[in-house]
Amino acid sequence: MRWWVIALVLGLATPVFAQPWSQGVSEQKKAAAQKKLEEGNALFLKRNFKEAFDAYQAALTSWNHPAIRFNVVRCLIQLDRPVEAYDELTKALEFGKDPFEEAIYNEALNYQKLLATQIAEIEISCSQQGAKVTLDGQPLLTCPGKEKRRVAPGQHGVVGTKEGFLTKPMDIVVVGGKTEAVDVKLMPLDKAAKVVHRWPGWIPWVVFGGGLAVAGVGGLIQINANDLMDDYDRTIARDCANVGCDLTDAKYDDLNNKRDKAEFRNKIAISVMTVGAVGAIAGGVMLVMNRGRTVYDNSAETRGPVTRLDFVPHDDGGVLTLSGGF
């Protein structure tokens, strides 16, 4: 792979008086820039891109030359910082092809096309006075207004806030070479609030009422059992108080059956009333637990395409890129 670096920016052919990037730059500053440029070139050829980037940046502080800035672009590309690389390339090409040799200028144009497909744009607008918007945690906009930012493809977080309004987080998915427009609209808290219940309102009442109804049925069975037992006791008192009764005698079978029936129904009544009481208690607990709670819909909104497959042609063939959210 060939590593192109601009080694001698002082020897460019354009006359100095026609070079706006050279106006006001002393020979001493040019020499200082040349020294840092050569240091950066040596580091770049050794693939020490971070150190080369720092050296080129130091050179720019002495001489803001487009050709030096293009070497900064090369470093940023190698450091996988395409958004910054595109911004720096835009500055480097501000004066067109004059600051560059023809081959370098053509290379810069190729980079511009390639980077344009590797970055995306988010255009954020809002109209609510005083609302504030952040992008990926950084302040972006105080409303009303509109801002556009170049970003790397993928998912980005937009958050709108305003006192008295519901905070609105949004997950924006963007792909290379495209612009995603976002209009931030916040909802007042009094409109965003809603009362929710654990269950539909009728369920606890059905459980509670059903329990009472079952307990009531058990009570009726108990009353019937008591009536039978009272009738049994009255018969015993009337027929057996003075002479006694041999209840094993067959003539008392109906009386014994009445007693057994009363005892059996009493057991059933107790079981039914117990079940009913448990149901009523459960329904009462559910009524307490089902009291309304005020909540706010603060779920993140996701916008933008999910995935995209792109083919970017260039002189040596092309690059296949897959971008988006997964």
Image (spheres, rainbow, N blue to C red):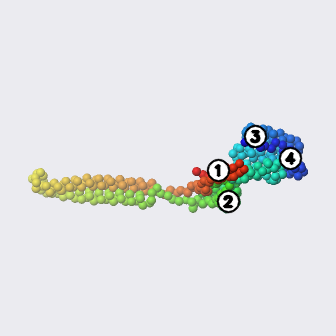
- Is residue 193 in view? yes
Please name the amino acid that badge 4 sits on: Leu
Element at badge 3?
A: helix
Q: Earlier in the sequence, mark 2 or mark 4?
A: 4
| Horizontal relation, residue 308 to residue 210: left or right | right
The tag on residue 125 is: 2
Amino acid tagged 1: Thr
The amino acid sitting under disc 2 is Ser
Whichever of callouts 3 and 2 sits on the residue coming sooner in the sequence is 3
Percent of width and height locating residue 318: 68, 50
Say whether residue 140 is visible: no
**Nearest-to-viewer mark from 2 and 1:** 1
Q: Which residue is mark 1?
A: 321
Q: Residue at x 50, y 56 (%)?
A: 293
State the separation of the CA atoms marked 2 and 4: 45 Å
At horizontal 18% and vertical 54% (from top left) the residue drawn is 259
